[in-house]
Image (cartoon, rainbow, N blue to C red):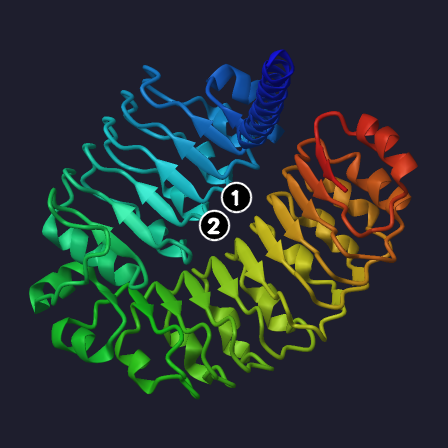
Amino acid sequence: MYIRVKVKVKSIIMLKSKIFTVFIFILLEFNAYSQKIEIGTFYSLDSALSNAKEVQILNLRYAGLSSLPPEIGNLVNIRIIYLAGNDITFLPPEIGKLVNLIELHLEDNFLQGLPKEIGLLENLVILNLPYNEIETVPIEIIELQKLRKVNLRVSKIHKDEQAKLRFMLPDCTFSFCENELLESTQPLLTSQELMQAKVFTDFEKAREVSSDVFIIRMSRRRLSHWPTELFDYKNVQSLDLSQNKISKVPKDIDEFSMLQTLNIRGNQISKLPSTIGNLEHLKKLKLGINQISQIPEVIWNIKSLQELDFSFNRSIDSIPDGIGKLTLLKKINFYSCSIKVISPEIGNLKNLEEIDLFGNAITVLPKEFASCDKLQIVNLNSNTNLDYIQALGVLKNCKDLYSVDLRNTNIPNMKRKKIKADFPNTELIF
């Protein structure tokens, strides 16, 4: 009897020991998981600004904030921002620097509007703005091609403004009324509402209203040629014909004299007419994913250009002389071309802020790069033959340089620590 009791007690002790071990294991796993979740998440503005490059999620719900400092623009890797329940009345222009931002939550504040720089958040998918004082949204929101959900419930957005937003972003779902779901469908608009909106994705509806149209979006329509109907709307300011099968730009393109943005990415264009150089108000020209073999000299005549995109034109092998004439350029995109040589005239671009040279065949950078006084972001990723010592020697003289992507440039691991020390104020991505 004594022996049986002793065995049972021993079994119970062993069972308890096993249960305790499993409990400790689960606790440690949960703790590790929690720490993993917390990495990159900040709950203090001061702490976030002090660790700007590490911030991925900023959670400042009900933090008593009345404004955001300009330094918010330093959080270049941030993906999600929560700012619900504060007293914020405006967003600083620097918000536009957060190009990796996916979600922006600002419900229950006192926002009067949004800065035009909101249009720079090219990766934004969700914009949550209910219970604010917003009456209008800047036209630059049309640039947010990835935007899918916008919540403006209990705001002061008028019906005509709602119509404009829905037509500017046809792939995005909006919520305006208290009882309206984010997944609500686009309403049928009257001619009067269309006239007020002046944003069209359908020529027939535009023709019913007026020739005074400032935005036309005809992306992904399987167009094989430039629509002749466009010439009924020569006052258009933003024209999007991207992701079609257009092979030719008409010679009378210059009749669109008020054009500021021309997006013809993702077509089959190999040449541009000389008349495109007469578009004296054009600020953004997007020619990526076409069949252009070299940069046409006529481009240098468009002195008003601020953004130029030739990405994925894989036969372009140089940035030639002439680039220096576009002194207002702020952003250049030559992603995945075949560039080997960059003209020294690049140094004339005193307003250049960003240049994307991913996936080219660059070996050296012209020393004139250092004259780009406002240069902040340089992407050299996947230039496998890059003389990184020479390139970094040039970039070291760019005083405002904020980020340089050097991945896949064959920089030895043992050299990286020293290189980072030479660029204390710049994020180097290896």
Please, what is the three-letter code of the amino acid marked with disc 2? Asn
In the image shown, does 30 or 423 lie closer to the viewer? 30
Q: Classify 63 as above or below 97.
A: above
- Report x, y in % for residue 363: 86, 56
Which dot marks residue 123? 2
In the image shown, does 141 or 293 lie closer to the viewer? 141
In the image shown, does 56 or 333 lie closer to the viewer? 56
Q: Classify 171 as above or below 49.
A: below
On the rendered structure, is 156 left or right of 338? left
Question: Is residue 326 visible to us here?
Answer: no
Q: Quadrant of the C terminus?
A: top right
Secondary element at image label 1: loop
Please, what is the three-letter code of the amino acid marked with disc 1? Asn
Secondary element at image label 2: loop
- Report x, y in % for residue 41: 51, 27
Q: State which tag comes first along the sequence, 2 or 1.
A: 1
User: Residue at label 1?
Assistant: 100
Spatial separation of the CA atoms under disc 2 and disc 1: 6 Å
* Image-quadrant location for residue 229: bottom left
Callout 1: few (<14), some (14-19), or many (20+) C-alpha neighbours within 10 Å? some
Callout 2: few (<14), some (14-19), or many (20+) C-alpha neighbours within 10 Å? some
